[in-house]
Amino acid sequence: MYHEIKTIVFDLGGVLIDWNPEYLYSKIFEDKNEMYYFLSEICTMDWNEQQDAGRRWSVATELLIEQYPDYATQISAYYYRWEEMLGGAIQKSVDLLEYLHLEGRYPLYALTNWSSETFPIAQERYNFLNYFKGILVSGQEGLKKPDPKIYQLLCHRYKINPLTTLFIDDNERNIKAAQAIGFHTVHFTDAEILEEVLMDLEIIPEMG
């Protein structure tokens, strides 16, 4: 099934970069239950994903503050203190990426759901993003995974054939959408399992 792999596409958040709003909001809320309420009912993942799809943070923040004025300060922090949600690189995954980059057999690309306004922070912080020949950022395109159009755009822009491409993502819905386009896929759960899969596919050698 995987013997024709010629290109590898990585997701970023949750695969190479550790991002979690709790890193910030555990400093803002003394009560964990209130923090969980805030992140599940106010600044939700669905709300955040609209910024990944291109909505401006100023618009998103204003809309939410109108609904929840008592949480205005906490809502504003989601953007203005966004960098504090970054927990660092997922080093084992980055090591695998670096090996693939240095070995040079496979062109490397990234497809990420990320706001165009916050992605420059990641670009400045993580040098390994330079390993990619191209990065498609959802917020810059007005499309986000799992919309099939963003996978098609990736293929068109970088002349990628999904039938000979391995796509790595930690979100199952994104994996299913990629499979529907024809990509080979790895549903990322941890770097050790990814390493085993890459060895099984003979993309990397046995690491000992």
Image (cartoon, rainbow, N blue to C red):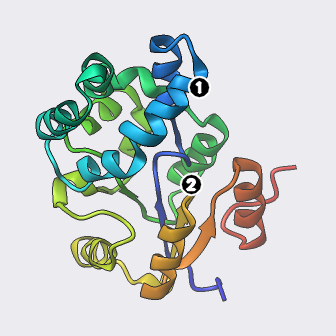
Q: Which is nearer the eye, 87 or 2? A: 87
Tell me the quarter of the image containing the N terminus. Answer: bottom right
Which percent across, then down, holds residue 201?
71, 73
Q: CA distance from mark 2 to mark 1?
A: 42 Å
Name the residue beneath numbered marker 1. 33
Which percent across, then down, holds residue 134?
30, 57
**Residue drawn where x is 70% and y is 50% of the image:** 190
Q: In the rendered image, which quarter is residue 119 located in?
A: top left
Q: Vertical placement of 145 versus 81: above or below? A: below
176 left or right of 107? right
**Residue drawn where x is 36% and y is 23% of the image:** 83
Q: Secondary structure at mark 2?
A: helix
Residue 80: in sight, yes or no? no
Count the labels in the image: 2
Q: Secondary structure at mark 1?
A: helix
Residue 100: in sight, yes or no? yes
* Amino acid tagged 2: Leu
**Residue drawn where x is 60% and y is 37% of the image:** 90
207 left or right of 1? right
Q: Nearer the viewer, mark 2 or mark 1?
A: 1
* Amino acid tagged 1: Asn
Q: Vertical placement of 98 versus 61: above or below? A: below
Please tell me which of labels 2 and 1 falls first in the chain: 1
Query: Could you classify mark 1 by the number of other residues whose Cα lies within 10 Å: few (under 14), some (14-19), or many (20 or more)?
Result: few
Q: Residue furthest right?
A: 208
Q: Which is nearer the eye, 190 or 25? A: 25
Name the residue beneath numbered marker 2. 100
Q: Which is nearer the eye, 38 or 19? A: 38
**Residue drawn where x is 47% and y is 45% of the image:** 13
